[in-house]
Amino acid sequence: MSPAEEGRFEREYYETVYPNYSRQNPPRKLRFYRRLVEGVAPHDRVPRILDIGCAFGAFLSALHPEWRRFGTDVSQYATDQAAATIPGATFARAGINDIPFSDPFDIITSFDVIEHIPSLEDVASAVHSRLVPEGHFVFVVPVYDGVTGPIIRLLDKDETHVHKRSRDFWLAWARKNFVLLEWYGIYRYLLPRLGYAHYPTKLWRRFTPAIAVVARRRP
């Protein structure tokens, strides 16, 4: 992602495309994300986790404060907000190819981010190189196939989504670059006056507008 492209994700982006950011990250949603990472966290040490595309840090704020928490985002506006509101975590403005933290991580997460990054090869390489052996990668992406595909394409107003792909594409990508462990479908939508609906499912995962994937680093 070029500097010009990265510059698209500053304050105006959040205020125009995601003005309801806090409402779109309710406790129910963050508990689900937390459950995914706790399920693969090491038990013999304090986990070290990196959230790529952390935005305002909502997910990292939901983790146990003893975890060693790091976040990166291409938006200076977002990382400044995160650093000001979440003590104990470390944030840096960085793209996928210039992550500044040298020590490896037990878990790397990326929620609704990698569909914005032009080179998925760069994503796989960066994640793989910064995970410990047997480390885990947990990500969420929107999907544009199935019965909900036409609706998602119609509702998607984010012009920075460069990968409008099917769930099978993302699952194949995960299997190619990592060891795929499990995946969920997610029904989600911000309902006027009713809050944000967020329902993960395995039973109906072939029909959801988004998926969550848990994978392990290849040896």
Image (tube, helix red, strand yellow):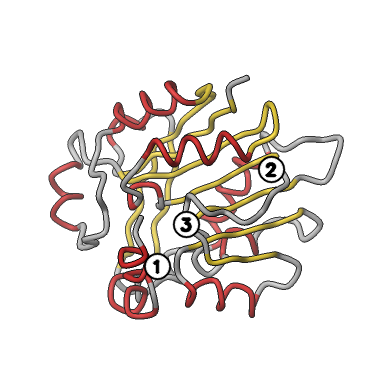
Secondary structure, mark 2, is strand
Badge nearest the viewer, 1 or 2: 2
State the residue at coordinates (37%, 44%): 141
User: What is the x, y in percent for residue 108?
Assistant: 59, 44
The part of the image, by quadrant, that contains residue 189 is: bottom left
Badge nearest the viewer, 2 or 3: 3
Q: CA distance from mark 3 to mark 1?
A: 32 Å
State the residue at coordinates (49%, 65%): 55
User: What is the x, y in percent for residue 16?
Assistant: 28, 77
Along the line of sight, the residue nearer the viewer: 118 or 40: 118
Q: Amino acid at mark 2?
A: Phe
The residue to which callout 2 is attached is 105
The part of the image, by quadrant, that contains residue 71 is: bottom right
Secondary structure, mark 3, is loop
Q: First in sequence: mark 2 or mark 3?
A: 3
User: What is the x, y in percent for residue 154?
Assistant: 13, 55
The residue to which callout 1 is attached is 195
Q: First in sequence: mark 1 or mark 2?
A: 2
Along the line of sight, the residue nearer the viewer: 173 or 23: 173
Q: Which part of the image, by quadrant, shows the C terminus? A: top right
The part of the image, by quadrant, that contains residue 203 is: top left
Q: Amino acid at mark 3?
A: Gly
Q: First in sequence: mark 3 or mark 1?
A: 3
State the residue at coordinates (42%, 65%): 24
Say if mark 2 contacts mark 3, CB within 8 Å. Answer: no
Along the line of sight, the residue nearer the viewer: 20 or 90: 90
Q: Which disc is residue 95 wearing? A: 3
Q: Give the answer, above or below, for where 45 lies relative to 83.
A: above
Q: Give the answer, above or below, for where 8 lies relative to 189.
A: below
Left or right: 200, with 108 as reference point? left
Q: Which disc is residue 41 wearing? A: none
State the residue at coordinates (42%, 21%): 176
